[in-house]
Amino acid sequence: MRINFTQKVFQNRGTMILYLRKIRILIILLSSVLPGCEKSNTFSPSGDYSVFAWNDLGMHCLNPTYDKLVILPPYNNIMAQVVKRGDPPEIITSGITVEYRLINNTTSHNKREYKDFWDSSNKLFQVTLAQNIGLKVHGLSGEMETAGNYFVAEGIPVVPVYDDNTWDPYQIAEISVKGTDGKVLINTRATVPTSDEMNCAKCHGTNAFDAILAEHDSENGTNFSNPSAQPVLCASCHPDPALGINTGSEMYLSRAIHDSHASRTGIGCYDCHPGATTKCSRSIKHTSPDGNCTECHGNMADVAGTIAAGRVPWSGEPACSRDDYQSKQYQGFTSRIKTIGSCGVCQDNSRGVQDELSEFNEKHGGVSPEKSTGCNACHISTPTATADWPHSYSWKNSN
């Protein structure tokens, strides 16, 4: 079965991501944190605009090579939302352009062994791509498109290798907002995570992908070892929601891989998922050397079993996508980064009490506060009446 990529792949994924984005837009806005009240406060918002940028996932994975078998293409997304500061602030999408560029990463095709993605794009995804252009016709720099009340660049074919050949799974993009005259109104940055760290050779030997295809032929009667059949897109038969493919002739790819490895010994999650070098540790739960995956996800048999029982792989997982660029940019210092709802950025206890509201308003309220807060990234003043605080702000918030 061949997939018409331009018609099917990522359609289902797009529906889910749109829902997540709506939630994430609010989360990103609430992630500008309060500057230190008792510390030196260098946060002094100026200018007419703020911009918030983010990636949709904590880590985008891609193949290290594309000549044998293919699980995931080089594919990354950047979103940005522009706010005109005021009372009230206004989210804007017209009268401006938003551009992005990967910093110190201007090409992908000629690095390491990624070129076969472009050389074989028609066979894999039924679309012919120019070098360094991704499946959504975006390159490593360009103009973002409007999508509702924000901007997006989808399918950026970034690889984890800088132009000086340094490998780094946490690439950085600069996002620039420009006016109609082409002048930059404001810049920001966002992490663009991407990793090709897979350790198939640990079990399958030096020519791991050849060995995997030969084993697949032996067990399933396929002919993937024939060079004329290569490269093989796994999702051509095995549905993979990470590609937006939810139906196919065989079981989900995630179930097939986890089930076939469940009885093998000496392997762990980080042998296939970006791990020991990437250190994809986006929460306290994941900071142990082995990722601590099984505490929540179970072992490989558990993962396969829950999919067999009806769970849709990948699509139900948290995105883990936020970095702290805007928190640092709009608060003016880097210590004790908290959300905008937390006084804990400078106080030991973020749970305020009612009789402290007057002190808060004295320092932070009004048009010209004694000390600015993260609210001022978008709002030019802070209402002194708590009933007028936006975003369902609660004085007795969690830390």
Image (cartoon, rainbow, N blue to C red):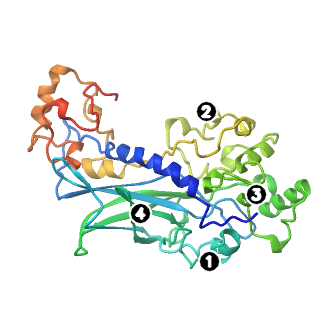
Which residue is pictured at 18% across the width and 34% down the height?
A: 388
Depth check: give the residue in front, 15 or 59: 15
Residue 296's disc number: 2
| Numbered disc 2: secondary structure | helix
Q: Residues within 10 Å of mark 2 (few under 14, many from 20)?
A: few
Residue at x 41% of width, y 57% of height: 79
State the separation of the CA atoms marked 3 and 2: 29 Å
Of the 4 image quadrants, the one containing the C terminus is top left
Label whose residue precedes the other's in the sequence (4 or 2): 4
Q: Is residue 166 above or below residue 265?
A: below
Inter-mark Cα distance, 4 to 2: 32 Å
Report, in whole angstroms, how far the alpha carbon at label 3 lies from the one at label 1. Answer: 21 Å
Q: Quadrant of residue 47?
A: bottom left
The reply to whether the C-beta atoms of the residues labelled 3 and 1 are less than 8 Å apart is: no
Which residue is under mark 1?
128
Q: Position of residue 171 (x, y in %)?
A: 47, 61
- Nearest to the eye among marks 1 and 2: give it: 1
Question: Could you tell me which residue is drawn at 51 percent across and 46 percent down?
Answer: 319
